[in-house]
Structures are given as structure tokens and as C-alpha cells.
Image (cartoon, rainbow, N blue to C red):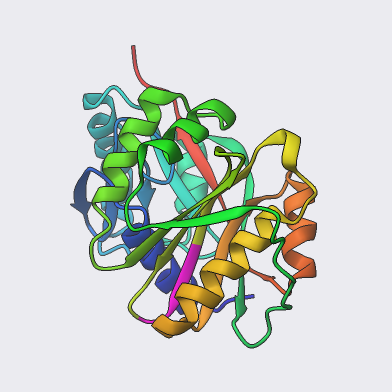
Amino acid sequence: MFENEDITRLQEILMNAWPAHHYYFLNGWILRFTNGITARANSVFPLHYTGNLDTLDQDINFVEKAYNAYKLPAIFTIPNYFEPNNLDIKLLEHGYQQSGCITYTMTTSVQKLRNEEINQEFIYLFHSERVNEYSKFLANYSQRNQEAQKILEALSNRIIIPQKRFIIVEYENKVIGTLTGILDPHGFLYIVDVLVHPDFRRQKIATSMLFIIINQWGIPNEVKTIWLQVETENNEAMNLYSNLGFKRAYSYYYLEKSIEK
């Protein structure tokens, strides 16, 4: 498990890898707003808190008003470390409830990653931007529709300082898989949007994409640590990454309060 300062650091890297449309800073908290698409981009990151016990209730009330102004529920990202240390209790007192399941952040060093052979039956294409074919595939086979994908395209365009690459897998000129890699300047490679067409699963396409982006792009750009996020209910993905050498670094969940009507 990570130490508190490591959790804070990786949460900061996550915000850079998944940049929101609008930010507001409140006594050390970072409020993120992106049209309600993904909780990561529409929640409070309580990495630090410069307020005190007298201001905490007031600040929570302000957060709720801020998200209500965007017609969004107020959501706090709650990792293993946050500030102040009684925030989760206070949020429950304010009527917040856990939203969704717990997510594990998993990491491994490049040296400890267990290499796998790449399935050469498919074509793997690199893109420096999130092309339309990428978004269309995710719209068809993920939980987010075409409208949501347009917002995510805009989000990916805001990734400037971290380097980014998008992989598309093709078979007979049809897209059957996607993966995004976002490389922090300090060598942290974030893996996201790993998706394979239902008819092509269990053919090592996901692991092939992973090792292609690491070997052909990450290592030449001095990657040191690979990291990703997996919901605890996704046993198949959890087993896959564990078998490749990934270890749990920390976990987080969301506390949410519905929008006032």
C-alpha cells in the first residue's frame, strides 16, 4: 500500500491525466466540473485542507451550492488519504451516500511487469489524438454514448503536458479494441479506456495493446511506473492485471449528495 504522500502525488497525476473543463479551489480542495461526464472529472479532490473545524461545514455547503449551480450532484473523491481526516464522517452527517463501488488503483514498475507475447493476428494503430473511430467504438460498446464521447474528446484535447497516445486495434478494417496511454513527465504511464469488442475477448488483445504501448512508446520515453484503475466488481480485469504483476496501491470511492430541486 502507498504512503499518504504517495497517494496525494498519484491523485495529482490523475487530475493532470484526466483534466476537467473548469476548476475551483476552496481551502486546498480542488473542485472539478466537466458537464457531469465521469465522476473523476466532476468531483472534489480533497488532497489538502487549509481550513479548520469551524469552516468545514460551511465549505461543504459551498461545494453543494457550486455543483448545484452546474446542475450536478456534489461528489467527493475519497481515497485512503484525504484532508481533513474527519471529512468522510462530516459528509455522511450532511446526507452524502456512497456512489458506485470501490475502485483500486494498481501499479507496477516496468521491471516487475510480467511480459506477454503480442497477438499478431490483429493490426495495432497508434494515434496522437483521439480520432473519430476511437470515440465511435467507445460509444457503441462502453457505457457512455456519442454525446458523452464528444465531451471526452474535448477532455483528451486538454491533455497537454502529459504525453498521450491512443491505440486502435483493427480486424478486417473494423475497430475491435481501444486503449489510451497518458505519460506523466516523471515517468508514470496511466492506462485507461481499455475496451475490446465482445466477440474478440479472451484473445489477449487487451494485454497486447498494453505491451505494445509500453514497449513501443513508453520505454523509449523513459516510463518507470505503469498504473491503472479497476473497479472491485470487475473480477476479470482484477485477475488479469494481478497476473501481470500489478499490485494495489490504494483504493478510493465516491460520496455523493443528490442535486437540490
Q: Residue furthest front?
A: 172
Residue 195 left/right relative to 161: right
Q: What residue is shown at x 69% (from left), y 71% (from top)?
A: 246
Residue 95 position, x and y percent, is 48, 30
Q: Picture quarter containing residue 51?
A: bottom left
User: Which of the two residues, 238 or 206, is positioned nearer the viewer here?
Assistant: 206
Q: Is residue 196 visible?
A: yes
The answer to whether 200 is drawn above or below residue 79 in the figure is above
Quadrant containing the C terminus is: top left
Which of the 4 image quadrants contains residue 204?
A: bottom right
Q: Give the residues in magenta.
A: 186-190
Q: Estimate the x, y position of residue 44 in percent, counting from the top left.
A: 35, 47
In this rendering, position of residue 2 left or right of residue 37: right
Dividing the picture into quarters, in which one does residue 105 lie?
bottom right
Where residue 168 appears, as percent x and y from the top left, is 51, 49
Residue located 45% across and 52% down the image = 87
Residue 106 appears in the rendering: no
Residue 192's place in the image compared with 148, above or below, is below
Main SS of the magenta part reads: strand
Position of residue 66 relative to residue 226, above or below, is above
**Residue drawn at (23%, 62%) of the image:** 160
> Where is residue 218 shown, x and y percent of the image?
47, 76
Residue 89 falls inside the magenta stretch: no
Q: Residue at x 59, y 83 (%)?
A: 110
Q: Looking at the figure, which quarter contains the N terminus?
A: bottom right
